[in-house]
Amino acid sequence: MTEITDRVYEALSGVWDPELAVDIVSLGLVYDVRVDEDDGIEIDMTLTTPGCPVSDALPAEARRAVAEALPQWPVRVEIVWDPPWTPERMNVDAARSLGVGRRLRI
Amino acid sequence: MIPGGPTAMTPPPSVPLSFLAAAAIGLFGFGFVAWFAGDKLVTVPNHPAAVSAVHMGVLAFLSVAVLGALHQFGPVVSNKRLRSVMAGRFTMVAMVAAGWLLPNGFAHGPEWMILAGGVSGAAAALVAAWNLSGPLSSRTGGVPVLGLRISVTYLVLTVAFGVVYVLNRQAAWFPLLPNRVLAHAHLGLLGWLGLTYVSVAEKLWPMFLLAHRPGARSGKVAVVALGSGTLPLALGLLFSVAWLAMVGGALALVGLGAHLVSLASSVKHRRRPLEMLHAYLAASTLYLVIGIGFGVAAGFADVDTGTRMILVGVEVGALIAWLSLAVAGHAHKIVPFIQYTMLRSRGVDRHPSGRPLLFGDLYRKAPARATLVLLTVGFGLILAGMLTGSVPLAAFGGGSLGISGIVIGLNLAFGPRLAAGGPTPEPATAGRQA
């Protein structure tokens, strides 16, 4: 299962936020990935802000990327707002690419 | 998967994009008319040619652009659809017609043109108010939706004022004194266009800056104070009741001040670097401060009537500059987003380099920077021309605005074609769509 989870994250790393030009894993938008042989792959993700302009496109893109990488697995993406995303969830590379690493102290 | 996010509520992309394309042409027309009316703007700001230029800017450019943005933003922020897509298209045609008929009528006649423009503008405003009342009746949406409800009411009021003035040209019920013209101008610039921008900014600024602010009280104060202050200000000007105008003006000042505090708070708490949009906002804010300064000076300075008219003219010009730069800056965000959605629905999701398509791929940065310079300098020259009595300055300023309309229109219209590289592919199959 760990291998499948890794492949899910790898697929999600190819999905970029079109405004920020950073992938959604590095942004910290992916909260959880659960793999179950009966239920398939369930992904919990969030968006940078409610009402985000890409709130439809980004989850759909995430689902499509994982479905293409693991075509034999059913994939579900859930948008969750709790806990809300904060910039501190970005990894160091994402924060640096946005030029705010020092501001966030990460 | 959520069943339908905010963008599932938006009208077809052709609705907002048609408004915004028409607005770019309106900006060109505004600059063109300001160029030819440069001498009147400088010497007789209430001359029909100058009034024509102002109406071109406020109707054919600003109102058309702001209505287009509202037809996209209202459904997104409220998660509710417009009442009718067809009504949205009607509003675009009717407001564009009003935006061109009225200024041409003022400048050249014949009188039927002014009447037709007034009727067309009234129809556009009423249909827009009805159509937008769908999303704006939402219980969600917070301060932005509250502000938009008030601003759309001001749109109807502004147009009602305008229709009375149009009819008065035939009936001669009352003389169209400068204070009455100013009441109309402040109703439209602060109540309709200004409050719309102030309300929308409360959603857009934190989003574009990834700003997680500890509180948004300044935004609420901005919307409530500007919304409640504009009406007494306009009524005070209309009926020459000084204390009422002062109360309204003070409230409007509080609102605009809170708006600036809100912007500063978003910038302070940002989690991404400033970008070109913020250069537009900085220039826009500078003109707002200039407009406030000249407005206060026009109200309180002990000067002769001619000087006061110049001060008021500069105030109105600066407020138009404030809104124009804000609209142009945000157009570089809104239009690429709508076009991105369109391209993806056609299966275009990659830049020619192979990486995922980004909003920033959908326009060229150099023309966008040129538009910023042309607008900032153009308005600066017009205001400087009005202050110094220099016709060439005002005329060159108008020319600069006209060129900016062409540049922004072409840049945003052809950006996607260049970014996507090559012919548009066939629509994606159902299996490829998530």
Image (cartoon, coloured by chain):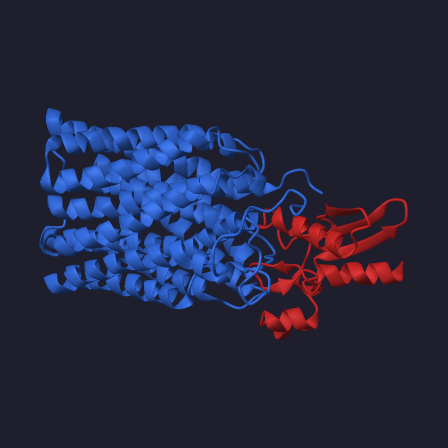
* Picture quarter with the N terminus of chain B: top right
Q: Give B13 or B422, whichever is nearer the viewer.
A: B422
In the displayed structure image, the side of residue B49 where residue A65 appears, left or right: right
In the displayed structure image, the side of residue B299 where residue B422 appears, left or right: right
Would you say residue B20 is visible in this rendering?
A: yes
Residue B416 on image: x %, y %? 45, 56
Residue A41 on image: x %, y %? 82, 50
Question: In the displayed structure, would residue A16 be above or below residue B335?
Answer: below
Q: Give B227 or A71, whichever is nearer the viewer.
A: A71
Q: Give B241 or A34, whichever is nearer the viewer.
A: A34
Question: In the displayed structure, would residue A76 be above or below residue B378?
Answer: above
Residue B175: image quadrant is top left
**Chain B shown in which color?**
blue
Number of disc labels: 0
Would you say residue B190 is visible in this rendering?
A: no
Residue at x 38%, y 28% (from the top left corner): B127
Residue B199 on image: x %, y %? 46, 46
Q: Give B154 or B116, whichever is nearer the viewer.
A: B116
Residue B374 on image: x %, y %? 29, 64
Question: In the displayed structure, would residue B120 be above or below residue A86?
Answer: above
Residue B404: image quadrant is bottom left
Residue at x 67%, y 46% (from the top left corner): B434
In the displayed structure image, the side of residue B301 where residue B333 appears, left or right: right
**Chain A shown in which color?**
red
